[in-house]
Amino acid sequence: MNSDIKEVLYTREDIKNIAEKIGSQLTKDYAGKNPLVICVLKGAFLFMADVVREIKTYAEIDFMDVSSYGDGTESTGEIKIIKDLDVPVEGRNILIVEDIIDTGRTLNCLVALFEHRKVASVKICTLLDKPDRREKTVKPDYVGFKVPNEFVVGYGLDYQGFYRNLPYVGILKPEIYKNN
Ligand code: 5GP
Ligand code: MG
Ligand code: MG
């Protein structure tokens, strides 16, 4: 285990199992619907890769990069589109894949954006949910795990760009970020 990690919450095996479960549900829910599955970069890249390989029906894949966080552990309250989609979304069934929902600001903005772009439907799939921290209404349709109010890293989630490559989700030791 990386020595900056206080506790491992979910192993690669736990995540693989939940991705299979969610994937088979998505296969049923999106059969014949030709969904556009959108990975919210960068945090969702590993979970996205796991989930889409479990979707056994036609699905199109795209990527968006939005930022709400800067380099710290607190939301800035604004989202900035760094990379938009490559395809138009009007009339499409959208599935957003996220790493974690915290205050809900990011996804609340994204869902509003897709509604503005006149999608047929928009649903949310997230690896992690921190419901205690919610400020904006966001109801994820597919949730991997609910996490306590702690700053977690790994399996795509970063602190200042690091830890994304850890093959598990763990709680970062507070002394790593408390002086920043
Ligand atoms: P929200 O807009 O819901 O507050 O936050 C969404 C984004 O904040 C997530 O996609 C993620 O990038 C970041 N975030 C929120 N909580 C955590 C956390 O515990 N760990 C990490 N690494 N990022 C987080
Ligand atoms: Mg994210
Ligand atoms: Mg981040």
Image: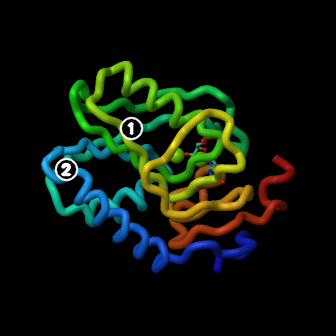
Tell me the kind of residue under disc 1: Met
Which disc is residue 81 wearing? none
The front one of 146 and 164 is 146
How far is mark 1 from mark 2, CA to CA?
Answer: 16 Å
The front one of 90 and 50 is 90
Few, some or many residues within 10 Å of mark 2 (<14, 14–19, 20+): some
The kind of secondary structure element at disc 2 is loop
Residue assigned mark 2: 59
Residue assigned mark 1: 64
Color style of the picture: rainbow
Quadrant housing the N terminus: bottom right
Tell me the kind of residue under disc 2: Ala
Q: Is residue 100 left or right of residue 92?
A: right
- Residue 174: image quadrant is bottom right
| Residue drawn at x 78%, y 54% as measured from the top left | 177
Few, some or many residues within 10 Å of mark 1 (<14, 14–19, 20+): some
| Residue drawn at x 55%, y 69% as measured from the top left | 166
Cβ of mark 2 under 8 A from ligand 2? no
